[in-house]
Image: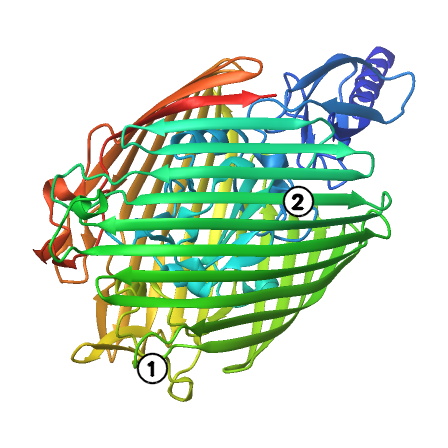
Amino acid sequence: MIKILLRLSVLLFTINTFGQNSLEAVIKNAEDDMPLLGANAVIKGTSIGATANLDGRLSLKNIPNGKQTIVFSFVGFVSKEVAMEFPRAKKDTLNISLHPGGEEMDEILIQSTRSRRTIADLPTRVEVISGEELTEKGNMKPGDIRMLLNETTGIQTQQTSAISGNSSIRIQGLDGKYTQLLKDGYPMYSGFSGGLSLLQIVPLDLKQVEVIKGSSSTLYGGGAIAGLVNLISKTPGEERDLDFMVNATSALGLDISGFYSDTYGKLGATVFASYNLGSPYDPADIGLTAIPEFNRYTINPRIFYEFSNDTKFDIGVNTTVEERTGGDIEYIEGEDVEDPFFEKNSTNRTTLQSGLEHNWNENNRLNLKTSFSFFDRKIETGDYAFSGNQFASYNEASVIFGSKQMEWIGGLNLWIDKFDQDKLSNDPVVDYAHFTYGAFVQNNWYAADWFQLETGLRTDYQNDYGWFVLPRVSAMFTLTDKLTTRIGGGLGYKTPSVFTEDAERLQFQNVLPIDVSKTEAENSIGGNFDFNYRTELFNVIDFTSNTLFFYTKIDNPIILENTQPGLFEYQQPNGYIESRGIEANLKFGYKDFKLFTGYTFADVDRTEDGNTFEMPLVSRHRLNNVLMYELEESLKIGLEGYYFSPQQLNDGATGQGYWIFGLMMEKIWEDFSIFLNFENFTDSRQTRFDSIYTGSISNPQFRDIYAPVDGFVINGGFKLFL
């Protein structure tokens, strides 16, 4: 009996001892010493693990006695293994530093939310194009950002002019007027100035592109019903940055860009300059340009000054001048043509912007920003001309205060947008003067390791359409260390404007001004739900999946209709627009190979007086596929395949579905690289399987453009890193 009792005592002591060992650890980014929220620690060979909180802290419990190996890991970082003997002689907190490696997307600081949080700990779903992906897309289309956005799941760049290349952004199937385009948080491209914006933004000086889909009106006001795209510029770093790019295309295009940044004590500077040339190009040999003739010059210097570690100031000027002419290619090439058709755009864009940031401490800061934009554009086609100048100004004061667990963001803003049309005929002008006064507040609450909540409220007063109150809420649930989910929604609005995709197709000819007394602002309600899963398949393949469900309803949509012979007027019929669908993204990583697959289903309808119609120019099914082979800092090879399903057209016909394939290559040395790209090498082109106009070359009536018109184009060049 005594022996039995002794054995039971030893067993109970052993069981009790088994549960006594614990370990406290703090996991941080080795590069900036920032805590890694969501990092993991696992006792190798067991199911014992823990996930780091907002401060990067975690606690492992019930660790067995003896020598154990703890694996510390975080998505986008190199894992670290630490061998330890338990029980420990000294029970101090273990500090672990992980180095970035592979995909670093989740540790990018997001600016569009105004918070200093990263992708991994944001209840608002933000997609970021940065780093290698931004470089690869920049190689393939160095002259503008159309390809950069069009090859993103859920986004479609819609070409609105067959001969000038003019395009707009469509998010989740909604018209481009419902997307807000920002540069460093400034709304620089709206109204008249938004018409050629995608064609005039060169990507070389961009650090990253942030996309928020769904209503984003709480922080940035009206116009973000479908979402927003924020283009983030590069800023000076610790080391000098001097990059040059030269690119030429088989369509006789040329792009020359340069970017410089450096610091001089408290002073920093960046300078971006580019020259972009396009030659008239007609691969279908139909007599009309698929790529217009254009010459564009861009210069963007910025100055940064650090008064102290807590106070920083920046100021910059962005100037773009362009001449763009499309149409009868013989006429553009200088031949004598009787009654030629052409469309000529002359634009001059200048923006001055400045910002001041003052930090009281790590969590509290003040931001002041202001911008003044001047935009002149003249459109000429035959004996018709439309021209005018737009002045826009954005002014904002915002504060961030609180703690990492409870953060508050509040601010006031004034947005001025004025357009004056040149009086070139007896037709009524479409002048307007819009003043929007806004106040907003947002709370970011880190309630627990598994739950975070964002709530926000904006109130705007617009001089023509009155008051708007816009609530918004987003929540994130960390269900396991591999699975997170987000849900959110909010209200939005859009004040009516004559400058839409439909009016752009008409060069604003015979478009009547909006009668404010007979129209109301468009209002929306929308929501998103998504879940993200990360794991390692077969211990060798990094796998990430993201699935998004979305819904947006827009009441009182403004429609451009042919109300009288030869005249077009904006009407507001009794009805609404609904956009619903799914986005799915899968990423696989195996050694030097990466595979990205995306699928978008967009069901967009317009209901008017009880009748429902399918919205035109929406690809209901889209596939995005990219296979990359990359030897770090040495070689990149990528194969792309994109599918667009048949689209409903405005004339009642249905456009044909098609695939676009591309092949890109880049060889990299320490301070030099060369690249070569075969874009659309299967030559998918609307003029191969459908027409783009009816009538004659001298008086064409253009149909919707739903597929590429430039076809197979080769481009290549070199980059210098000095």
Q: Above or below — where is 550 with respect to 268?
A: below
Which residue is at a point 39% across and 70% down the rendered structure image?
Answer: 554
Percent x, y of residue 608: 26, 76
Give whichever of 350, 227 is nearer the camera: 350
Q: Quadrant of the N terminus?
A: top right
For mark 1, does the 10 Å Cα neighbourhood hold few (<14), some (14 to 19), or many (20 or more) residues?
Answer: few
Percent x, y of residue 306: 81, 44
Q: Secondary structure at mark 2?
A: strand
Q: Amino acid at mark 2?
A: Arg
Q: Above or below — where is 634 with respect to 106?
A: above
Q: Above or below — where is 565 with respect to 330?
A: below
CA separation in Å, label 1 and label 2: 40 Å
Percent x, y of residue 368: 73, 59
Which residue is at a point 59% across and 48% down the rendered structure image?
Answer: 477
Q: Quadrant of residue 293?
A: top left
Is 37 positioned to the left or the right of 656 in the image?
Answer: right
According to the picture, the residue beneath numbered tag 1 turns out to be 428
Q: Residue furthest right?
A: 90
Q: Residue furthest left?
A: 695
Is 493 positioned to the left or the right of 691 in the image?
Answer: right
Percent x, y of residue 265: 82, 34
Q: In the rendered structure, which disc, 1 or 2, sits on the residue that comes first in sequence?
A: 2
Give whichever of 659, 276 is nearer the camera: 276
| Residue 143 appears in the figure | yes
According to the picture, the residue beneath numbered tag 2 turns out to be 302
